[in-house]
Amino acid sequence: MGEVIELRAGEFLARVDRTGAGLRALAWRDRDIVWPYGDEGPRAFQGQVLAPWPNRVDEGVYRFAGTEYRLEVNDAATGTAIHGLVHDREWSVEEVSDDAATLRLDFGGAPGFPFPLELVLAYRLGGDGLTLTAEARNTGDTPAPFGLGFHPYLTLGEPLSVLAERGDLTLEVTAGTRLPVDDRLLPAGDPVPVEDGRLDFRTPGRQLGDTVLDTAFTSLERDGDGRAWVRVGGPEHRVSVWCDRSFDWLQVFSSDTLGGSDRRAYLAAEPMTCPANALASGTDLIVLPPGGATRHTFGITAEALPRP
């Protein structure tokens, strides 16, 4: 793996990887609040930047501006191209301080995606946690399709399954609808309300229990600062992901399909600008004109919970 940048501020510590500009680790009060990885590299895209598309593209095939493109299928189980093309690239370090780092990638395009982009990712650590701001600019001379996501897995120090069995695991997702999917995790219709109860996590303090999630939520409900939230609570503290208005989707994954001790151990809370298969469907796909740019911000934080 590449160079590791360590950031500190208040009760938080972060480690950022030049390879993929990934979030290797984030700790609060000396405890991990995201699933960390080391020199062996990430598994299941933990901590990775998902660009120029998040989630899946059916058989890697899409059409843009009248031309068909074919991406490499890298998820054999579903026959899809998953999570973009930048997670294994070496990013350059533009600026570093004790509590902040800015990385850049001049992406020249790739087979199936011949659209050059400049990507800039700024990490900032403060007393309220980690904030990440991503900017993408089309450096080519034709319009470019674009989508963005991030893939942190939240942890409370014990596996989700153990906490849930004890009744010590709560989940809040501030979203009014979810996207139905087929058995290959591709969209199967329009978003539907979460009011059926099973996947309605808008009420603070709801137990996760044995609910299995690999679900894209939308119709995000925002606070006064325009932020939508995923909050995971344990017996002593809570870990949360928030995203600004530039993200219309939150993918929540309870890690049930991971192998071994990682199965149902963490909760991925993934801000996304578009859902699965957006390159093919066009749903919420960003189209950048030549020289056009887009900007997106999300964050991760932790806080102690009052004792009962």
Image (tube, rainbow, N blue to C red):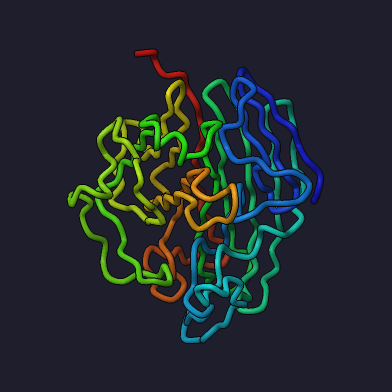
Q: Is residue 204 left or right of residue 186?
A: left
Task: Say which quadrant the C terminus sits in.
Answer: top left
Q: Is residue 173 left or right of residue 270?
A: left
Q: Position of residue 151 (x, y in %)?
A: 54, 50
Q: Residue at x 51, y 61 (%)?
A: 54
Q: Is residue 217 above or below residue 201?
A: below
Residue lying at the far bottom of the rendered structure: 67
Q: Is residue 91 above or below residue 4?
A: below
Q: Position of residue 228 (x, y in %)?
A: 36, 40
Which quadrant would residue 126 be assigned to in this image?
top right
Q: Is residue 234 above or below residue 253?
A: above
Q: Position of residue 82 (x, y in %)?
A: 55, 67
Q: How many marks?
A: 0
Q: Position of residue 66 (x, y in %)?
A: 46, 86
Q: Residue at x 31, y 71 (%)?
A: 188
Which quadrant would residue 258 be assigned to in this image?
bottom right
Q: Residue at x 26, y 61 (%)?
A: 191
Which quadrant would residue 74 be assigned to in this image?
bottom right
Q: Is residue 291 above or below residue 129?
A: below
135 or 195, which lies in front? 195
237 or 52, which lies in front? 237
Residue lying at the far top of the rendered structure: 307
Q: Is residue 304 left or right of residue 102?
A: left
